[in-house]
Amino acid sequence: MSSKSRKALIGITTYGRQAPLPFSLPSEYIDAVRAAGGIPILLPPGEMEPATLVDSLDGLIISGGGDISPVCYNGFAHPTIYAVDSERDAFELELAKFALERHLPILGICRGLQILMVTCGGTLIPHIPDVYGTSALHRLEPEPGRRLPTEHFVKIDVESCLADCLQNSHVSVVSWHHQAVDKVPSGWRVVGHALDDGVIEAVEHEHHPWAIGVQWHPELSTVVDPSNQRLFQALVQAAHTKQS
């Protein structure tokens, strides 16, 4: 079978070995890629040759999860920072670097958006309420044994690639995060904000053929707004374009 006719191989990073279920991933990521026509390939932290992985893929999703160590962006400790995994941090930062250098189509989701920002020299707000207050909720307080996402609206720049992908400039999303982008690195531009409080919710690269980060969880958001699935369809289409 020729490379042009096969399905796109989409790598998805997983949780680390310290997670309650080591090297796991919520099934919604896999379902979203399959529904978009791609083949999901799970990428556990700890692989020693991320460049080789990147070269074997047609597209990449850096998934959500625990917080990035503030050491990675010259930040500072905060009592709300949780589930830091240095092995996962190192793996995903290297993976993102090679994916960007090789122009591999890449989608950062929640933590994944933050990985893209930190890879390129950006910084993070350690805890959203400290800067934006609590007029809008980006997560509900966790209950024992489970995390509770929440819904809100995001306004997308109509002139952005993201708006073209979603075919929408005003989307309802599901999110679960307490950190956000602070300094946006050179080469990236902000293309989405939370409607209620202005938190940065989406970025895209100005020169890379297809590199987008969203702070919400599109794989969970298709129920509240089906346009979220179009983001995965656009990633798979970009991956097919790279094949050719």
Image (cartoon, rainbow, N blue to C red):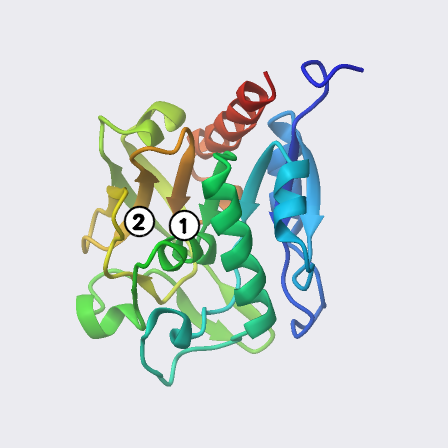
Residue at coordinates 69% horizontally, 70% vertically from top-left? 17
How many neighbours does mark 2 have within 10 angstroms: few (below 14), some (14-19), or many (20 or more)? many
Q: Please state which amino acid type lies under the numbered disc 2.
A: Glu
Asked if one can make out residue 218 in the rendered structure from this viewpoint, the answer is no
Q: Quadrant of the N terminus?
A: top right
Q: Is residue 182 above or below residue 8?
A: below
Asked if one can make out residue 204 in the rendered structure from this viewpoint, the answer is yes
Residue at coordinates 32% horizontally, 44% vertically from top-left? 202
**Does residue 195 appear to the left or right of 73 in the view shown?**
left
**Does residue 213 appear to the left or right of 27 in the view shown?**
left
Q: Position of residue 63 (x, y in %)?
A: 54, 52
What residue sits right under mark 2 in the picture?
201
Residue at coordinates 69% horizontally, 59% vertically from top-left? 47
Q: Position of residue 62 (x, y in %)?
A: 53, 50
Quarter of the figure with residue 49: bottom right
How many neighbours does mark 1 have within 10 angstroms: few (below 14), some (14-19), or many (20 or more)? many
Q: Is residue 101 above or below residue 242?
A: below
Say which of 133 and 234 sits in front. Answer: 234
Q: Please state which amino acid type lies under the numbered disc 1.
A: Trp
Q: Position of residue 180 (x, y in %)?
A: 31, 61
Mark before the other along the chain sequence, 1 or 2? 2
How many numbered discs?
2
Q: CA distance from mark 1 to mark 2?
A: 7 Å
Residue at coordinates 68% horizontally, 58% vertically from top-left? 44
Numbered disc 2: secondary structure: strand
**Does residue 43 appear to the left or right of 217 in the view shown?**
right
Q: Position of residue 243 (x, y in %)?
A: 61, 21
What residue sits right under mark 1 in the picture?
216
> Mark 1 touching mark 2, by CB under 8 A?
yes
Say which of 31 and 59 sits in front. Answer: 59
Numbered disc 1: secondary structure: loop
Say which of 120 and 26 sits in front. Answer: 120
